[in-house]
Image (cartoon, rainbow, N blue to C red):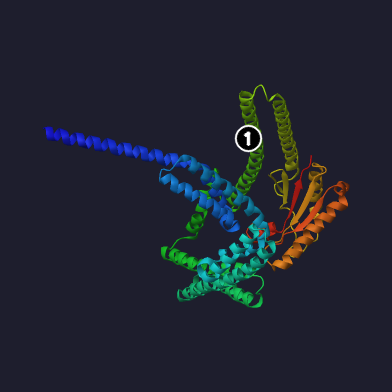
Amino acid sequence: MKNNLKSKSKIAVMFFAAMLIASFSGYAQKSKSVVFKDADRAMKNAKSIKADILSPLEYDKALGYYEDADKDFDNNKGIEKIEENLFKATNSFNRSIDLSYSSRIELANSLNARNDALSVGADIYAKDLWADAEKKFISASVQLEKGNKDDSYKVAVEAIAIYRKAELTAIKTNMLDETRTLLAKADDMKVYKKAPETIKKAKKLLADTERELETNRYDMDYPRSLAKQAKYEAKHAIYLNETIKKIDDENVSMEELILRSEIPFIKIAETIGFVAQFDEGTKLAENEIIDYILFVQQQNETLFAENTAQNNRINDLVEHVNVLNKERVAMNAEFENEIGKRTAEMKSNMQAFETTKSKLAAKIKHQERINEKFSVVEKVFTSAEAKVFRSGDDVIIRMEGFGFESGKSEIQPKNFELLTKVQEAIKTFPNSSVIIEGYTDAFGSDSLNLVLSQKRSDSVTDYLKANMTELKSMDITSIGFGENNPIANNETEEGRRKNRRIDIIIKPKF
């Protein structure tokens, strides 16, 4: 009996100890997530904008501080040292983010070449070339961080050449070889009987890609697009063949076939909250779905603009509170320690305090004025004409409705009304500086696109100068960015139309 009691006691103690350990373990885990919260967020933000390759020196420094803190935490070292390293890590991650934004501009062409190579699987199908290009790119980023712009430019140019080779290799290996294999499979399956038009299209696209790769070695945008389409259409043809065979085997009626084709529309319509009807075909349901998507996109853009403005206000208030608290702590400490000796100094601090307070009040008022004027500008344009949003104090008017014809820079009469609205928006911010940015789609050589985008921004700038006397007193700049910074998919006609655009950036001055 005693032995049983002892056994039960031991089990109870062991169970209690296990529970206690689990409890402490959970506490430690929770504690670590709290302690590392700011550093984790900063690291996540740095990774999201590729700071590891755009600002490698600062990012690696941040990572070193973070890993030291992580090791010390796991070894139960002093919290002061851990917090000090995490503070340094957070600052370095944030600095790497700031440096990455400027690197994106300086290394834009290299970054575009990298993205193009990545989009066709160069990291998988041209591993050696990809690794060499990555080394060059990171080396260019390092030189830029050190302030050696000329050296950075030279290495960046070398990286572009290797990325383009890797892209070409990947297109031939990934896209063309796979497409040829798919077409051979399609021939064995006699796909030409069930899906003749689709398989014919796939073969033509493959031939067009091979021709473009042979005749045009300076612009990979068009052949890359053709190669992707060829591969897709080959797979599409095989799918159609299998689907049509299945329908034939099931002996499905034409009515049943049409009813089946309506099911995806019905499911999408139910998800977004309306009943799809097909008494006049699918057009009505299609239009309602498109209208809903456009509405949601517009809502998202509006929420983004409102969120940016709200964040600006919050940041100003936080800064205001922080300054007030610091001043108050400093004043209290001096008051307590040297109440009889520091009267003059206290007055000076009070004056500085009041000066800081008035400056912050002026800054908040400044933000309120910008927010009011931003709301005015936002209402000037319809959603089809332009998207208006904020970046800090800057107001950006993205004229998506201002479409240039492919390869041309002339302003068409249909755009005069939109340019009149742009003038109205600029007048809302008198004495501000204005930047006109021109962009192209990705088709055509990089150098020609750069020239074309400059012509487009110059055309708009000249038009505004000719029609706005106010611009004479403003600082106005015209810049062409070529095919850099696309806002839509260059693989589609609609995406390319959106990328042939003008952005107006208004930098308010009060």
User: In the rendered image, which quarter contains the C terminus?
Assistant: top right
Q: In this view, does 105 lie above or below 509?
A: below
Q: Residue furthest top?
A: 340
**Res. 198 image quadrant:** bottom right
Q: Is residue 226 left or right of residue 481?
A: left
Q: Name the residue under label 1.
A: 318
Q: Can residue 202 be seen in this view?
A: no
Which residue is at a point 54% across and 55% down the rendered structure image? Answer: 60
Q: Is mark 1 on a helix, strand or loop?
A: helix
**Residue type marked 1:** Val
Which residue occupies the foreground of this view, 284 or 37? 37
Give how far across and how far down residue 177 sits, in percent: 51, 74
Which residue occupies the foreground of this view, 194 or 148? 148
Give how far across and how far down residue 161 sits, in percent: 63, 70
Q: Residues within 10 Å of mark 1 (few under 14, many from 20)?
A: few
Give how far across and how far down residue 139 sits, in percent: 60, 63
Q: In this view, does 313 lie above or below 490?
A: above
User: In the rendered image, which quarter contains the N terminus?
Assistant: top left
Which residue is at a point 59% across and 48% down the rendered structure image? Answer: 94
Q: Is residue 333 above or below residue 292?
A: above
Which residue occupies the foreground of this view, 62 or 97? 62
Q: Is residue 101 left or right of residue 191?
A: right
